[in-house]
Image: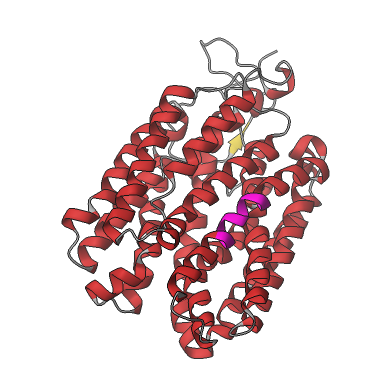
Amino acid sequence: MAGKQPSSDRRGRFTQATEPAWEGDLPGREPVLADETAPGPAHGRWRALAFLSLAELFMLSPWFGAAAVLAALTREWHLGDFAQAGMTAAVQLGFIAGTLLSATFNLADLLAPRVLMALSAALAAAANAALVPWATGAASALVLRVLTGVFLAGVYPPAMKAVATWFRQGRGLALGILIGALTVGSASPYLLRGLTSLPWRETLLVSSGLTLMGGAVVFLLVGEGPYRFPPARFDVRMALAVFRERGPRLACLGYLGHQWELYAMWSWMGVFLFESLRARQGGVHLAANASVATFFVIAAGGVGCYLGGLLSDLFGRTAMTMAAMAVSGLSAVLIGLTFAGPPWLTLLVATVWGVSIVADSAQFSAAITELSPAAYVGTALTTQTCVGFALTIVTIWMIPPVARLVTWRWAFATLAPGPALGVLAMARLRALPEASKLAGGRR
């Protein structure tokens, strides 16, 4: 039996009629099966996940493109601290604007994921490549980086929704694999910079080419799975409704604690490793060594995402996210103690941090898909992502002045309160009845 269309009350809260909202259909349309009544595992789901993951790996490569070539840009354009931080923070600002527009107009629920992702990838590739002929300094570069972020907002949240349409069971693992691919893709410009002699312009063009390839893969080879969410009607109030319900709100608060440290660590780990090697008099290949090490540290998060998804489906969303945030918060404190120490020790702690810091990322998204009404899962995911990335701007810009004030030995320790608060939020969610909806009853 199909339920009633999920709706919102006059304050924009999720409501339901006679049956749960996540089993709904639209009046006058054919009923849409809910996850609970759908058939067994979808045929072709692993093929779809593989193509989606490959597409994400390619499409997210422009994210840290400017950060990977930051040293060259700083020399050529004489960038100060504010402009250097802006090369990454500008993408975050654009991403926030893009997700805000998408959530406001319910784009992730009104357009097919593959259409929205392919179009967004093409526009992101164009904005990233435009740095080569048009950018002549920080001002023009920052505008193009903002535009790149705006268009990347149409790549990330819709991919999570698309994966959820293929996986009823094992959704945490599937989203973990997807976010793992995204993590490796985001780190790829560091690898290009460390292993090749490509100038910064060619590095950015390669990343744009990869983005176009990813858009083609998702458009030509990936559709929605059998566990489609009900069609949505435009309702601007649903963009904020995720914060008015206890379960989704606590999942979002846990995500905010996670985001407080994630992008600041990803953005400044390369500088930290470079400065640590320089303080130890690391040799002539200092920049290349730091770039390759940074890729390794960030890409190690791909392993963390896989393990996080596997463990989350086995032991529960809240248990896994609390464990990951405890390890990553401790790593944020310990990494500074290795500064200018043996490179192998610094790399070891950084790798543990790289694995743990993103291992929980997909599970916050999985929780939102399980706690939110089905017709507005895309909007809920987009809203969660928008607010989380807004917070990252604070810490990305915060780290350089903090490093000058307390040195790199203690700068990353300021990120530890984020995961600590995230643990508290997920512990609170674990105690609620709503937690029984997570991971098939595994809290």
| Most frequent secondary structure within the magenta stretch | helix
What colour scheme governs how the chains and residues are painted in the rendered image of this protein? secondary structure
Res 114 quadrant in image: top left
Q: Quadrant of the N terminus?
A: top right
Q: Nearer the viewer, residue 316 or 175?
A: 175
Q: Position of residue 246 (x, y in %)?
A: 68, 48
Magenta extent: 296-304
Query: Residue sitting at 29 percent across and 54 percent down?
Result: 202
Q: Position of residue 104 (x, y in %)?
A: 41, 41
Task: For residue 377, say whether it is visible.
Answer: no
Above/below status of 275 relative to 50:
below
Q: Position of residue 259 (x, y in %)?
A: 56, 60
Q: Nearer the viewer, residue 117 or 256?
A: 117
Task: For residue 257, say whether it is visible.
Answer: yes
Residue 300 in magenta stretch: yes
Q: Quadrant of the C terminus?
A: top right
Query: Residue sitting at 59 percent across and 37 percent down?
Result: 14
Q: Position of residue 360 (x, y in %)?
A: 67, 53
Res 323 quadrant in image: bottom right
Query: Residue sitting at 55 percent across and 34 percent down?
Result: 161
Above/below status of 114 relative to 14:
above
Above/below status of 237 relative to 343:
above
Residue 433 in magenta stretch: no
Query: Residue sitting at 51 percent across and 86 percent down?
Result: 281
Q: How many numbered marks does the figure carry? A: 0
Q: Nearer the viewer, residue 345 or 313?
A: 345
